[in-house]
Structures are given as C-alpha cells and as structure tokens.
Amino acid sequence: TVDLSYLDFYAQAVADEDLDSIDFFTLNNDTVFEQFLGQRNIEFFDGFSQGSDSKFWWDTMSFFQPTKPRVRLLKLHGSVNWYTDQHFGKGSKSIERVDDATLPYIWRAGDVPEKAEPLFLAGTLNKMLDYTSEVFSFLQSEWLRSLYQLDILVVCGYGFNDKGINTRIIEWFNFSSDKIMIVIDPSKDVIKNARPAARGLLARSKTESRIQIIQKSIQDTTWQEVRDRILNQLPN
C-alpha cells in the first residue's frame, strides 16, 4: 500500500462537520486521490454508476438524484482509468471506469472493449477544444454551477496555467465581494508563474485579505489553519 498520508489535509476537511458539502475538482488524471479517499474510507461520488454488468459507467443522470452526496470528486480532464470505445465516441453511454487499471495505458486482457483508449485531456491550450465533448462539457458545467453555489474556494497544487479554468475562477471571484480564495502553494513564484489574467488576480492578495496565499506544501498545511483564515474573513 502506498503511503498517501501527505494528503491528510483533505481528510481533515471532510471531517469538518461545519461543511455541508465538499466538491473536489481536480485536473490530475492519475488515480492517487481516489486511492487516498479509499484508504481513509471516505465515500465519494464521481459521476459513475454501477451497471447491470457490475461495471461502472459514466451516468450523467446520476447528478440529478434527489439525494446529494456530501463529497464529490470530479475530474475535469478525465482519468487514466476511464476508457471509451471509439465505435461510440466519448458519449455518456460508452465511458467505463476501470478501477483495477493501476497503470496508464495498461488494459485488462479481454475486459476492455476493442479499440478502447484511456480518456483524459493533455496539452496546454488544446484541452479547451475538447471541453465541448459530452462528458467534458458536462463536467465543465458542473464546475461552473458548483462555483457559483459557494463562497469559499481553496486551491491546492494548481499553477494557474489553464486559461479555461482561470477564466472561471476570475469571473467567480469578481461576482461578489463575499468570495474568499485560499491558495496553498510552496513556490515563491506562484504569482509570477501564473498566466497573465490569473497573475493579476493573485497579485490582489497583496492588498485584499479575501485572497490569501499560504506558502506551504499541502503536507505541511492543516485544515485548521485554512479554516481559521476563512473564519477571519467572514462577517461576524
């Protein structure tokens, strides 16, 4: 078993009973986060439902179930263990989550459909072209809907180099003066290395307390530290 204790920050956040719901949006396409949640016995929703064949298939309608899951993990760029059959394209009826595919590009003999390939986005600017395909367009809409339902965004391990994601964050932050963003990043150059528009937003951390940058790695940061910073910004 791989030691993933360096991610305990996220388990601490899940344990905070004051949080009614938690959405983890990630651009990573590996399965480390799912493994971590599994090790901590944290149940989560990711958009897949078990079919009559006992396999897990992408299910757009599962997002509209009356009972809302408290913890969601939505992978905006797909995953190395998502497989799509090219005979049917990238539609919601043909994407399977293969949980025992632990290595990228390694397929289970006889279990993965012919012409199947892992479904994830790569590259710098070309990813936005794929945001229009069915599963990715829906994930983008969920990301946007979730953003506008929250007032607090905690950003970890993101370099602010995806123009599409940056645009959403900037528009959300400027939507009202109630928005609070905490950025956790050990780099001294997190502002400098961001794309221009995001650089301008992050630079406001020098004059606006509702944007704060914690210059630490995630394993050296506690949820209590972030929680205290958030509470200091909320109205009494």
Image (cartoon, helix red, strand yellow):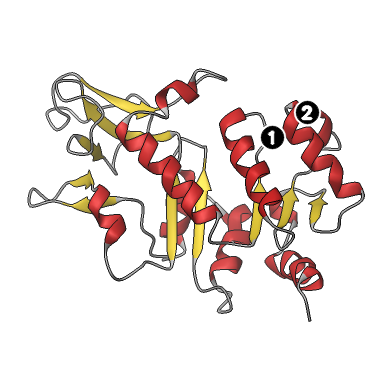
Q: In this figure, which residue is indicated by the disc labeled 1?
A: 159
| Location of the C terminus (image quadrant) | bottom right
Taking the spot 86% from the left edge, 37% from the top edge, the residue there is 188
Q: In which quadrant of the rendered view does residue 176 lie?
A: bottom right
Q: In this rendering, is residue 65 above or below 112?
A: below
SS under mark 2: helix
Outermost residue on the left side: it is 52
Q: Tell me if residue 145 can be seen.
A: yes
Taking the spot 26% from the left edge, 48% from the top edge, the residue there is 60
Q: How many C-alpha atoms fall within 10 Å of the one at disc 2: few (<14), some, or many (≥20)?
A: some
* 112 and 133: which is toward the camera: 133
> Badges 2 and 1: C-beta atoms under 8 Å apart?
yes
Taking the spot 39% from the left edge, 60% from the top edge, the residue there is 44
Type of residue at label 1? Gly
Q: In this figure, which residue is indicated by the disc labeled 2?
A: 193
Type of residue at label 2? Asn
Q: Residue 123, how many percent across, how many down? A: 52, 19
